[in-house]
Image (tube, rainbow, N blue to C red):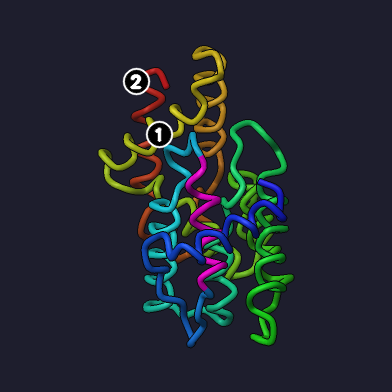
Amino acid sequence: MRPDGWIAAGEARAERNVGDAPPEAPDGLVLPEPLWGAVRAAYGEPGRAYHDLAHVGEVLRRVGEVARDVGWRRPREVFLAALFHDAVYVPGRHDNEARSAELAREAVVRWLPGEGLDEGLIERLILLTARHGALDPADVGEEEALFLDCDMAILGSDAAAFDAYDRAIAAEYSAVPPELYAAGRRRFFEKLLAAERIFLSPYFHARLEARARDNLRRKLDAGA
């Protein structure tokens, strides 16, 4: 969705008072109704079997765990980056993250002026999600590693949740011939397993690394 269409959708939803209540933001940040309407419009686009508001909610749950156990230096920026990181999602495109970062900046400028937010940090966190599986811990800072791991935490979930995630990703790529999709998925799983670490932060590495590797090996053994 183009930024102007995304903004119009948010304002239209706000006028109709459509949608569930927004998630609670940290440090007194209040999400204006048009911003939340725009987020709902973006994640409600057809074809999203995994990259929807449920996924955002799960990432925010992980963000909350880190806030409780470790703490964030810029919690409001992390929250907004999580909220917008998949605002644009078209399977197979390579500019989803860049377009999502653009929408995040547009939202902050339009609806959260004067909040003292670091727009560059929000953009940087979102853009880094394009490099999942291609980064080492030394490539990122502590909070960047934690943020990326919040997004990847599904890999270390229990087997049932992981399998549901895997089916949902396949549904999003249903237009791709099955043999091509399966080959690409195998390459991605093999790349993750070949890495020294799947999770970049000590926090998630200690909690989820072993289970993530078990899930990936199980899928590969099953012919994923």
Image position, residue 25 (x, y; %): 46, 77
SS under mark 2: loop
Q: Is residue 123 above or below residue 216?
A: below
Q: Between 180 and 2, which is closer to the camera in this rendering?
A: 2
- Main SS, magenta residues: helix
* The C terminus: image quadrant: top left
Image position, residue 216 (x, y; %): 40, 34
Image position, residue 14 (x, y; %): 51, 66
User: Can residue 39 be found in the magenta stretch?
Assistant: yes
Amino acid type, label 2: Ala
Q: Residue at x 52, y 42 (%)?
A: 45
Q: Which residue is mark 1?
A: 168
Image position, residue 161 (x, y; %): 29, 42
Disc 2 versus disc 1: nearer the observer: 1
Q: Which residue is mark 2?
A: 222
Query: Which residue range is magenta in the image?
Result: 33-45
- Looking at the image, residue 180 sits to the left or right of residue 120; the answer is left
User: Can residue 118 be found in the magenta stretch?
Assistant: no
Q: Residue at x 64, y 74 (%)?
A: 111
**Residue 145 picture quarter:** bottom right
**Residue 144 picture quarter:** bottom right
SS under mark 1: helix
Amino acid type, label 1: Ala
Q: Residue at x 54, y 46 (%)?
A: 196
- Looking at the image, residue 186 sits to the left or right of residue 18; the answer is right
Q: Between 123 and 5, which is closer to the camera in this rendering?
A: 5
**Residue 66 picture quarter:** bottom left
Q: Is residue 169 above or below residue 116?
A: above
Q: How many marks?
A: 2
In the rendering, which numbered label is found on residue 181? Answer: none
Mark 2 or 1, nearer chain start: 1
